[in-house]
Amino acid sequence: MNMNKSLLLGLTAFVVGCETPATYKDPEGRELVVSIGKVDIQDFANAGNAMLQEMVKSPAFDSAGASPVIQVGQITNDTATNFDLSLLLSKITGPLVNAGRIRLIDSDPVASAARASTPGAAVPLPQYVLKGKILEDRANAGRTKQSSFVFQLALVEVKTSLQVWQKEKIVTKQGTTNAVGF
């Protein structure tokens, strides 16, 4: 019995001693935790950056004139994970707004109430609506798990209801367990 207690204490000390202390990591670096079954922060960053680059190159922006007005429409999360879609949208709209490339209509309830109570407040009509969907596909082969997340976005011209830009970015992760990516 005494031997079992000593073994248990020794094993506990070994396990506790092997734990990794928490550290700060570069959110755009390669040393982040990769979760096979869910969208990670780096997935939003990668998908958002790729889509932003494609949107900026789009002829729709050249023909729209200076700083077109955009409103975010419905973005559907069709994955098994619940997350805040602003993690993706901020990667796309933030740089465009900050660079003066677009003006974004904010649908914040407080701002809307303030506009409604201000006589003569004019809210510009959107020229475009940004809409999209995030889908998920999972597969297993033996112990290996794979999850693919499909980020789809489209820009629709309001006056014609025509889609003037569309992009799909697929993020696929595979492994037997969650890991730290390198």
Image (cartoon, grey):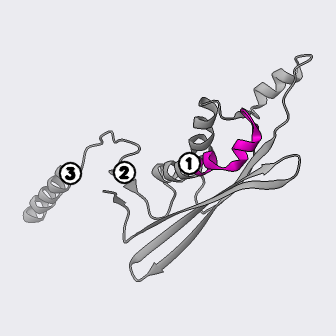
Q: Main secondary structure of the magenta part?
A: helix
The mark found on residue 82 in the picture is: none
Q: Is 60 colored magenta in this rendering?
A: yes
CA gap, disc 2 and disc 1: 23 Å
Mark 3 or 2: in front is 2
Residue closer to the observer: 173 or 62: 62
Mark 3 crowd level (few <14, some 14–19, many ≥20, 10 Å Cα): few
**Of 103 and 115, the residue lying toward us:** 103
Query: Residue 32 shows which numbered tag?
Result: 2
Quadrant of the image occupied by residue 110: top right
Q: Dot 2, how many residues are within 10 Å of its Cα: few (below 14), some (14-19), or many (20+)?
A: some
Gap in angstroms between the C-alphas marked 1 and 3: 45 Å
Kind of residue at badge 1: Gln
Of the numbered discs 3 and 2, the one sitting upstream in the chain is: 3
Toward the viewer: 9 or 81? 81
Is residue 6 shown in magenta? no
Q: Earlier in the sequence, mark 2 or mark 1?
A: 2
Q: Mark 3 belongs to which amino acid? A: Val
Q: Which secondary structure lies at badge 3? A: helix
Query: Residue 62 location, x and y as percent?
Result: 70, 42
Instruction: In the rendered structure, find residue 53 and report the number of the disc placed on it.
Output: 1
SS at badge 2: loop
Q: Which residue is mark 3?
A: 16
| Labels 2 and 1 touching (C-beta < 8 A) | no
Q: Which residues are magenta?
A: 52-70
Give the mark toward the camera: 2 or 1.
Answer: 1
Circle 2: residue type: Leu
